[in-house]
Image (cartoon, rainbow, N blue to C red):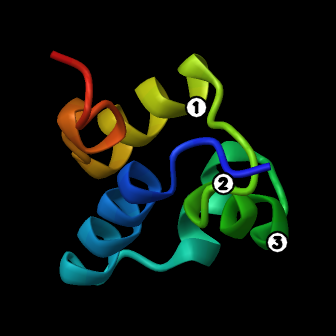
């Protein structure tokens, strides 16, 4: 199932632009890199708590997670 691939790609693109490693994000969240990769590629959803943690720790704008919400 693909939850929100365009938005997930926004987050992935932001991480790459800021040179933030997926491994660092996964370790910070306490999840496996494969699990994070599935979330970043839209195969599963981020939890609200994970979004807030990523925002707080890595300064990823909330808009990257909720791009299509008006």
Identify the residue at image location x=56%, y=69%: 24
User: Which residue is the site of mark 2?
Assistant: 39
Q: Label 3 vs label 2: CA separation?
A: 9 Å
Mark identifier at residue 60:
none
- Name the residue: 23% across, 37% down: 67
Measured in 3D between alpha carbons, the distance from the residue under mark 1 to the one under mark 3, in whole angstroms, is 15 Å
Look at the numbered disc 2 and give the secondary structure of its residue: helix
State the count of labels: 3
Q: Residues within 10 Å of mark 1 (few under 14, many from 20)?
A: some
Q: Could you tell me residue 39's position as x and y percent?
A: 66, 54
Residue visible at 31% across and 30% down?
Answer: 66
Rendered location of residue 8, percent (x, y)? 46, 55
Judge whether residue 27 can be spotted in this image: no
Within the image, what quadrant is residue 32 found in?
Answer: bottom right
Displayed quadrant of residue 17: bottom left
Q: Do the residues labelled 1 and 2 touch (CB within 8 Å)?
A: yes
Residue annotated with mark 3 = 34
Q: In which quarter of the image is residue 70?
A: top left
Above or below 42: residue 13: below
- Residue drawn at x 52%, y 45% is 4
Looking at the image, is 6 positioned above or below residue 18?
A: above
Residue that badge 1 annotates: 50
Please report whichever mark, 3 or 2, sits nearer to the chain's N-terminal start: 3
Task: Determine the CA span between mark 1 and mark 2.
Answer: 11 Å
Q: Which of 57 and 60 is in front in this view?
A: 60
Q: Is residue 52 left or right of residue 14?
A: right
Q: Nearer the viewer, mark 3 or mark 2?
A: 2
């Amino acid at each position: 199932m693909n939850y929100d691939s365009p938005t997930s790609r926004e987050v992935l693109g932001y991480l790459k632009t800021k040179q933030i490693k997926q491994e660092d994000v996964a370790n910070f969240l306490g999840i496996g890199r494969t699990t994070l990769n599935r979330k970043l590629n839209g195969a599963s959803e981020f939890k609200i708590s994970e979004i807030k943690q990523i925002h707080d720790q890595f300064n990823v704008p909330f808009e990257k997670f909720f791009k299509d919400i008006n």
